[in-house]
C-alpha cells in the first residue's frame, strides 16, 4: 500500500459559485482553509502542521482582510512546500511578484476572464461621463428636472486615448468603434498590427494632448502608481473626460478633485478608488463624477468564470507543476 501523503490546497477567501468545481479538487489534494482571523494569526498558522505539505493556494482579493498584502514579510513565513499562488482576479497589485519569484513561488491571475464585463462597465461610464448623466440622475432624485445640467457631448468622432491596451483596452475599443470614436493608445510596447485593429500607437504625452476622452486600463504597480497627477492633467485638453476601471491608485485622486474643480477635467466615470472602500469626499460631492462601487466584474457569469479559471490554475499546478496563466512578470522565469 502506498504511504504517499496527499498534497494540500489552501483556500484563502471564499468560493461563491463554483462549488462543484472546487470540491472536485479533493480527488487530487486535501482541501484546507485557515482558522486565522488576522495577519499575525495567519503567520503563526503558516508555521503550524495544519499548513504542512500545502503546495498551492487559491486566493481572492478579499482574503487580504486576513492575510494582509502578500509582501516579502509574509512570503518568508509561507510553508516551504507552497510553490503556487493562484489569484482570482486580473489585477494582482496585492501580491509582491518579486518576493514570490525570489521564494520560488509562481503566481497566476485570470487575465481574459474579466475583459468583456469590465469593458461593458467602461463603456457605460464613458458614455455617462460624456453625456453628463450623473448630474441629471442626482438632480432627478432631488425632484429637479434638468436643473444645472449643461449639454453633454456625443462620442462620435471624439478621440479616445486608451492607456494600457491589454485585453480590456482592446475590448473597449471594439465597443467604441461602433460609436465611431478614433482610438489612440499608449502601452509600454507597441502591439502587433492585428491586435491594434486600427488604433494608433502614440507616446504618453501625445495621448494626453490629443484625447477628448482618456480611459485608464493599465495594471497598478510601482511604475504606474499616480501615473496621472497634476503635471499630466496640465497637458490634457480643457474639458477632458476621464474613465478609470483599472485601479484607483493609478490616478492621484486629490489632484483629480482639483482638476475637476478648476474645470480642466469636465467629468469622470470611476469604478475604482485609491483607498477602497473609502471614496475621496471631493469626488462624492462633485456631481460631474459618475461613481460605481468597483462593479466591473460584478456579474454572476463573470464571477463564476473567474472562479473556474482560478480553480483550473490550481488543478494544473498540482497535476502538472505549471499554470495556465502565469503572470507576465514570471513568464520568462525558470523555476
Image (cartoon, rainbow, N blue to C red):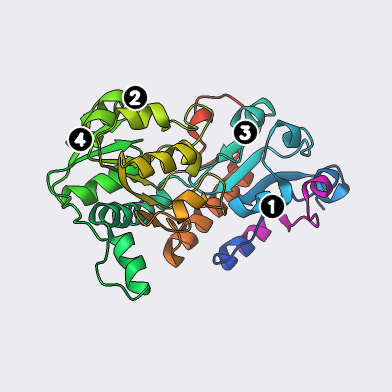
Task: Name the element at disc 4.
Answer: loop
Disc 2: CA contacts within 10 A as few (<14), some (14-19) or many (>=20): few
Q: Nearer the viewer, residue 308 or 283?
A: 283
Residue 167 shows in this picture: no
- Binning the other alpha carbons within 10 Å of mark 1 as few (below 14), some (14 to 19) or many (20 upward) gives few
Q: Against 325, is 137 above or below?
A: below
Q: Residue at x 32, y 54 (%)?
A: 125
- Is 200 included in the stretch rendered in magenta? no
Q: Nearer the viewer, mark 1 or mark 3?
A: 1
Which numbered disc covers residue 96?
A: 3
Q: Residues within 10 Å of mark 4 (few under 14, many from 20)?
A: many
C-alpha gap between disc 2 and disc 3: 23 Å
- Tell me whether circle 3 and circle 4 mark residues in contact (CB < 8 Å): no
Query: In the figure, is residue 179 to the left or right of 142?
Result: left
Contact check, label 1 and label 3, Cβ < 8 Å: no
Alpha carbons under labels 1 and 2: distance apart: 35 Å
Q: Residue at x 51, y 52 (%)?
A: 281
227 relative to 16 in the view: left or right: left
Q: Secondary structure at mark 3?
A: loop
Magenta residues span: 24-42
Q: Position of residue 204 (x, y in %)?
A: 32, 26
Circle 2 is placed at which residue position?
Answer: 189
Q: Marks 1 and 3, Cα distance to the nearest angstrom?
A: 16 Å
Q: Residue furthest bottom?
A: 143
Location of mark 1 (residue): 65
Q: Which residue is mark 4?
A: 199
> How far separated are the C-alphas under marks 4 and 2?
14 Å
Q: CA distance from mark 3 to mark 4?
A: 32 Å
Amino acid at each position: 500500500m502506498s504511504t504517499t501523503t496527499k498534497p494540500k490546497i489552501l483556500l484563502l477567501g471564499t468560493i461563491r459559485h463554483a462549488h462543484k468545481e472546487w470540491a472536485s479538487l479533493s480527488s487530487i489534494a486535501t482541501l484546507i482553509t485557515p482558522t486565522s482571523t488576522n495577519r499575525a494569526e495567519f503567520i503563526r498558522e503558516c508555521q503550524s502542521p495544519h499548513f504542512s505539505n500545502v503546495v498551492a493556494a487559491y486566493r481572492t482579493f478579499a482574503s487580504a482582510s486576513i492575510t494582509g498584502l502578500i509582501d516579502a514579510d509574509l512570503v518568508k513565513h509561507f510553508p516551504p512546500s507552497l510553490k503556487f499562488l493562484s489569484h482570482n482576479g486580473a489585477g494582482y497589485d496585492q501580491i509582491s511578484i518579486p518576493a514570490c519569484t525570489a521564494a520560488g513561488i509562481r503566481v497566476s491571475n485570470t487575465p481574459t476572464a474579466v475583459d468583456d464585463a469590465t469593458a461593458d462597465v467602461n463603456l457605460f461610464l464613458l458614455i455617462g461621463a460624456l453625456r453628463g448623466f450623473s448630474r441629471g440622475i442626482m438632480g432627478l432624485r432631488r425632484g429637479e428636472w434638468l436643473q444645472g445640467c449643461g449639454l453633454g457631448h456625443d462620442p462620435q468622432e471624439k478621440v479616445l486615448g486608451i492607456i494600457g491596451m491589454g485585453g480590456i483596452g482592446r475590448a473597449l475599443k471594439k465597443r467604441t468603434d461602433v460609436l465611431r470614436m478614433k482610438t489612440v493608445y499608449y502601452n509600454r510596447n507597441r502591439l502587433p498590427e492585428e491586435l491594434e485593429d486600427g488604433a494608433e500607437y502614440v507616446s504618453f504625452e501625445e495621448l494626453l494632448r490629443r484625447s477628448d476622452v482618456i480611459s485608464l486600463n493599465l495594471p497598478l504597480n510601482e511604475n504606474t502608481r499616480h501615473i496621472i497627477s497634476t503635471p499630466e492633467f496640465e497637458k490634457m485638453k480643457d474639458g477632458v473626460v476621464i474613465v478609470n476601471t483599472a485601479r484607483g491608485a493609478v490616478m492621484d485622486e486629490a489632484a483629480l478633485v482639483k482638476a475637476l474643480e478648476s474645470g480642466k477635467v469636465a467629468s469622470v466615470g470611476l469604478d475604482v478608488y485609491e483607498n477602497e472602500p473609502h471614496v475621496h469626499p471631493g469626488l462624492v460631492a462633485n456631481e460631474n463624477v459618475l461613481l460605481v462601487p468597483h462593479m466591473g466584474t460584478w456579474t454572476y457569469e463573470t464571477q463564476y468564470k473567474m472562479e473556474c479559471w482560478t480553480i483550473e490554475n490550481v488543478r494544473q499546478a498540482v497535476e502538472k507543476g505549471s499554470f495556465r496563466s502565469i503572470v507576465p512578470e514570471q513568464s520568462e522565469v525558470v523555476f
